[in-house]
Image (spheres, rainbow, N blue to C red):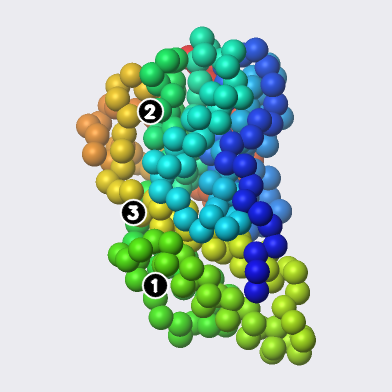
Amino acid sequence: MQAVVGTKPLCSRLSSGDGAAILVADFQPLTAAPRLSWLVSEAAAGHSVHQVDPRGALSGDRLYATLPELAEEAAAVFRAGEPAAAGRRVFVVGHCSAAALSLQIAGRLAGDRDVTAILVQPTWPGTEHVTERYAEFQGKLGEGSRPQPDLDGDPWSCVAGMEQLMTEGLAGVAKRLGLSKAPLAFSELLVSYRTWLAFLLACRNDQPVKVPSAAVAISVLTDEPGFVLPGEAPGRCKITPPPPAERPDAVTPELAKHVLDQVNSY
């Protein structure tokens, strides 16, 4: 089964404006729920809002990329697309597991402008997170007995191996449904699962978390009691509680407003 979509742009502009630039690193959920970047762009009148989509950048023939590679690419694309923004403050927003990537992007942009990283309910995916998500995806395919991937080997081979096993699982689903071949939706599902796993693996492989210098201000929206940025002393971050939500990872217009409140507080 071949992937049905090519590699998408890692960084793309959603809206324009003369105010501070806002880069939002986030993901399309495995549902039709809105993305934080879309909600921020709809509410951020006067700001230039850019979407950083690491899963999209891994959706074609590019099976894997390290966080430093993704961060360098996103920073370069942003600079090329916003040459007039060199004198304006930049905010790099990272949602959930995009936190580490956002910190690295912020560090690369800090050399020639004021930069603030805003982490929204940050998480730091490790080995357990990758294996749990892989097992979850296999379970959805009715393939719960498949072996766990070797995460310590070559990451490109690891992702390719997981993709092959999931491809076999989807072929089994199609056969059980009496289909002569897997439908297009199955290919799209395979890409969705693979890109999640590839990005989580990149996060796992880049630990410990790289925190930019003190030149980058860091604001965190979290309901985690006593949150401390990994490897840093308490007090490194400005901590603000997010709006109430049914789930910590829920994306709502109220959450986007809280993000913009942080932007407007600088």
Residue 185, compared with residue 34, is above or below; it is below
Badge 3: residue crowd in 10 Å (few <14, some 14–19, many ≥20): some
Mark identifier at residue 205: 3
| Mark 3–mark 2 CB contact (< 8 Å) | no
Give the residue displayed 48% in from the left and 61% down from the top: 197
Residue type marked 2: Gly
Name which quarter of the figure residue 85 lies in.
top right
Q: Disc 1 residue type?
A: Pro
SS class of the residue under badge 1? loop
Which residue is pictured at 27% across the width and 46% down the height?
Answer: 208
* Alpha carbon distance from label 3 to label 2: 19 Å
Label 1 neighbour load within 10 Å: few <14, some 14-19, many 20+: some
Q: Position of residue 61 (x, y in %)?
A: 57, 58
- Mark drawn on residue 129: none
On screen, 242 above or below 196? Answer: above
Q: Residue furthest top?
A: 87
Provide residue 232's location: percent of width, then percent of height: 24, 34
Q: Secondary structure at mark 3?
A: helix
Question: N-terminal of the two: label 3 or label 2?
Answer: 2
- Residue 194 x/y as whole percent: 54, 63
Residue 149 circle label: 1
Q: First in sequence, mark 2 or 1: give its number.
A: 2
Q: Real-space Cα distance between discs 1 and 3?
A: 14 Å
Q: Which mark is residue 107?
A: 2
Which amino acid, by three-letter code, is at mark 3?
Answer: Asn
**Which quadrant holds the N terminus?**
bottom right
Residue plotted at (45% across, 82% down):
146
For residue 99, say whether it is visible: no
- Please name the residue shown 39% across and 41% down the image: 68
